[in-house]
Amino acid sequence: MAKPSRSSLADQLAIMAGNANPALAKAICQHLKIPLTDSLVSRFSEGEVRLKINENVRGKDVFVVQPTCPPVNDNLMELLIIIDALRRASARRITAVIPYYGYARQDRKDQPRVPITAKLVANLITTAGAHRVLTMDLHAGQIQGFFDIPLDHLYAVTVFEQYLRRKHLKSIVVVSPDVGGIKMARAYAKRLQAGLAIVDKRRDSPESTEVMHILGEVKGKTCLLVDDLIATGSSLVEAASALERSGAMAVYACVTHPILSGPARQRIAESSLKELIVTDTIPLTAERRHPKITVLSVASLLGEAIQRIHYEQSISSLFDGMMG
């Protein structure tokens, strides 16, 4: 069966967005060369989400672009309501495109009387009526198993790799800021043909850490810290300081999701980091931006994945051999 022409793509596929990251949704539409679906996502006077889809979506393959970033509860509720409206409007298939999956840090019952919010949110999205989920760099890989619907997991490493190769950095060592991030760090090291190191640290509290020592050779090297998200920035800044004390020539960081809450911006500004490279899965407001922070767009990667899902083509081939 021949692939439908691109001119007819807008008749079969629709992109919708809430208020979480409309700029990313528009960039995805530019990549796909289709318009963003006209909709109203606002609030009633008491704060409830008000939604109206202003176009016919009956029988369409609809992708809802809505990261559940701060304000997390508002953006999550918008996502659920949009999915419900699309289901009632007879969309053929609804895919929740969640570049940043919030509530992911509570992914297991590691203490008595705590919730597993990552599973709860997965249940909410499924119950609302989503048929599929497209996300990027989950905080924990096992979250994929929390969904009873298909989930496609993208990796931002390809976007970072292109940028880093243009910088022509020498003697790179990829550094995992903790033991849990070794798999991600190994993937970066493999793509960049670089060395590998680990920061051994002891966590004093959920918001602060004490770095102990570095496992691996970093003296005289260009160190590249890699992680999935940065919240308050304490872990990353402590790791950068430890690398500098260990003789690193320069310290860069690649982090997919820039939450940058609380004192994160000030910590980055005062840190030994030469550059913090992030993506636009979460929009950066003016007050959270800094000359040290570089934002790369994942719109093309998401757009390519959306097109492949629509045409029932392979997503994993985008990352062949990466996570081995």
Image (cartoon, grey):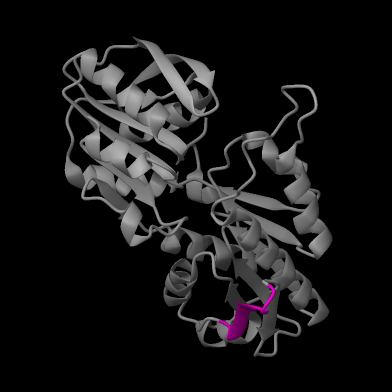
Where is 163 relative to 249, above or below? below
Region rendered in magenta: 37-46
Let me know if residue 207 is in the magenta part. Answer: no
In the depicted view, which residue is nearer to us: 33 or 272?
272
Q: Is residue 174 visible?
A: no
Q: Quadrant of residue 268?
A: top left
Q: Position of residue 98 (x, y in %)?
A: 59, 57
Q: Is residue 125 left or right of residue 194?
A: right
Instruction: Return the x and y of residue 121 as percentages of the image width and height.
Output: 73, 49
Instruction: Pick out the residue farthest to the bottom.
Output: 55
Q: Quick one: 288 or 195, which is closer to the camera? A: 288
Relative height, residue 192 to residue 64 (above, below): above
Residue 112 placed where, x, y %?
Answer: 79, 22
Q: Residue shown at 70%/90% (left/top)?
A: 56
Residue 224 in percent (x, y) is at 30, 30
Between 138 and 93, the one nearer to me in the picture: 138
**Quadrant housing residue 262:** top left
